[in-house]
Every structure is written in structure tokens, then in C-alpha cells.
Image (cartoon, helix red, strand yellow):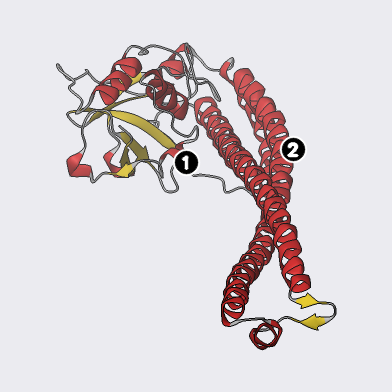
Amino acid sequence: MKSHNVKRMLTGGIAAAAVIAVVGVHTPAVADPDPLPPGASEELREYRELVAEAEQLNEAHLEAQDDLEVAERELEQAEADLEAAERSEREALAEQREYRHVVDAFASASYTNGAEVTTMSALLAGQSTQDYLERSTALDVLAADQNEAMERLSSAVEQASVAQRDAEDAATRAEQARETAEELVVDIEARQATLDERIEEVREAAGLLTDEDQQMHQSEGADAPSQIVAPGAAAQQAVDAAMGKRGSPYEWGADGPDRFDCSGLTSWAYQQAGISIPRSSRAQSTHGQPIPRDQLQPGDLVFFYEPVSHVGIYVGDGKMVHAPQQGDVVKVAEMMEGDFSGARRVA
């Protein structure tokens, strides 16, 4: 009877997969921090399938939230660029009008009673050599000022044109970012609803497990290194914060201070050190400086599976502190060497 009830819950996986396919965000591989032994009950195995399915939904939900933050930053930047471009365009047009007026004034001044004033006309109209020299000098000054005004006018026209193009580009980027953000909000709401349904099914399935099943579900822990010394103050703070949360229960979507999922623990720990990192394990795996396996130091983020779907904080001696899975607690564990996919240093 228990097995039948769990199988009924598993049929919901078709709907969950449909939601993932419709929204179009890549779904990561399922993390399994501690594979079950051969003697595990069918109820426990089917419970693990539900947990894995919910983990997929949770990670995709977190990725969508990260994408929304990026879209919102892009929108903010595009709107700031648009405002700056429009301001530059207004200033350039004002300067253009000013120097067009000056150029027109020079053009008018070049004529006297309908006749163009030139060096030759100044010579013919002058009463003496000194009179001619004074008129000629005045004309030279007028010509130089007119040339400068023409150059300033030409520059203002070009600046206005560039500013207009910049404004059009910023307006287009702002509209695209706005549309992306609106689509992601709808996406996130749909993901949250599906995740909530799956979590409720997991909770129901957990009630069908025996005490032995629940004990078997817990991942294996390890003793913490006798001394954990990170290379920097911020990394040390993050390690200490995470280690201080050992025993806190795992919960999908939780980022502290009392419950955590895997990336919620790492992001919360670094937040305590004043460092902001992305929320999902996938986004965290591209943040900071990549570190080879043989150069790991306490505080480094360590990632697992391809594509990434699990993260912990390295504490030394080949161990990490992490939030393993639903039904488990934050603990120190041996790194899953066979599933290791990379590391990043963020402090």
C-alpha cells in the first residue's frame, strides 16, 4: 500500500517535466550526495526520486531568479544610458541652435547695403592706406570667428546625431530588458507553484518511510579538520559562518538563517563576510576565480555534477561543509571526488 501511494505521487513528475520544457530553462542533473545501498526499500528509492525531481525544480527556479536579477540590472543600466543620451542630445541641439544663430549673424554682417564685404571692397571704399589696413584686419578677425563658429556648429550637429543614435539604442535595450524581466516574473511564479506541489508530495512520501529508511536516507558525515585556516579574512568568516550552521535542516529554496539548500548555505555564509554571490549553484560556478583541484584552500566553493547542481564550501583535508539534500542537515563530509566538476574562489 505504501509503495502504491508513492508511485501515485511520482506520476506528478510528468507535469513537472512539462513545466520545465515550456519555460525553456536548462534543467541540471540531479545531485545525489549519498547513493543508497542495495538493500534500500522500494519506498525509500521512490522517495529519493521525488526528492531528486524537486531538486531539479528548485535549481531551475533559483536559476530563473538569478536571470531576473541580471535582467533588472540591465534594465536599470539601459534606463540610465537612455537618460544620459537624451540629456546629451538636448545639450547638443541647444548648442547647435546657438551656433547656427551666430553663423547666420556672420553671414548677415558680410553684406552691407546688399553688397558683399570683401578685402577688395574694403580697399576701394577706404579713404587711406591706414583705413584699408584697419578694415582688412577687421575682416580677417570676422572670418576667423566665422570659421570657428562654423566648426562649432558642425561639431554640435554631429554630437546631436550621435546622442540621438545612443538614445535610440538605449531605448531598444531598455525595452528588451523590460520584456525579459516581465517574462521571467511569470516564469518564476509558474516554477514556484510547481515546486510547492512537488514539495508537498515529498512531505507526504516522507511520512511513509520507516525509521530505518529515514536513517538510511541521511548522507554520511565526517569529522571536521582539527584546524581550518582560510587564506583571507573574508573566506575565514564564510567558513566559520557555514560551520556554525552544522545541524541546520535542509529545505528547498531556503537561504538561512536556520534552514538552507546547498547554494543557500554558500550564499548566506559569504553574505556574513560582506560578499554577495549569485543564488543558484549554476551561477555560483561561474562566479569568482577558477581554482584547480590541487590548489583548493578553505573557503573555496566546490561544485559537483555536470551540469552543476550541488555546491559546498571546502574546509581542508579533502572535506567540505554543505547542505546535502532534503531530509538531511548541514554537515561536514568528504568531497564527492568522482562527481567533482570545479571550484571557485570568491574571496
Going 69% across and 46% down the picture, which residue do you hit?
A: 180
Q: Is 184 left or right of 245, judged from the image as shown?
A: right
Picture quarter with the N terminus: top right
Against 345, is 316 above or below? Answer: above
Q: Looking at the picture, which amino acid does disc 1 mark?
A: Ala
Q: Nearer the viewer, residue 115 or 212?
A: 115
Q: x, y percentage for residue 187? A: 70, 39
Q: Earlier in the sequence, mark 1 or mark 2?
A: 2
Q: Looking at the picture, which amino acid does disc 2 mark?
A: Val
Going 58% across and 17% down the picture, which residue do you hit?
A: 208
- Classify residue 234 by image quadrant: top left
- The local secondary structure at tag 1 comes to helix
Going 70% across and 86% down the picture, which residue do you hit?
A: 121
Q: Residue furthest front?
A: 128
Residue 283, disc: 1
Residue 186, disc: 2
- The local secondary structure at tag 2 comes to helix
Q: Is 183 left or right of 341, judged from the image as shown?
A: right
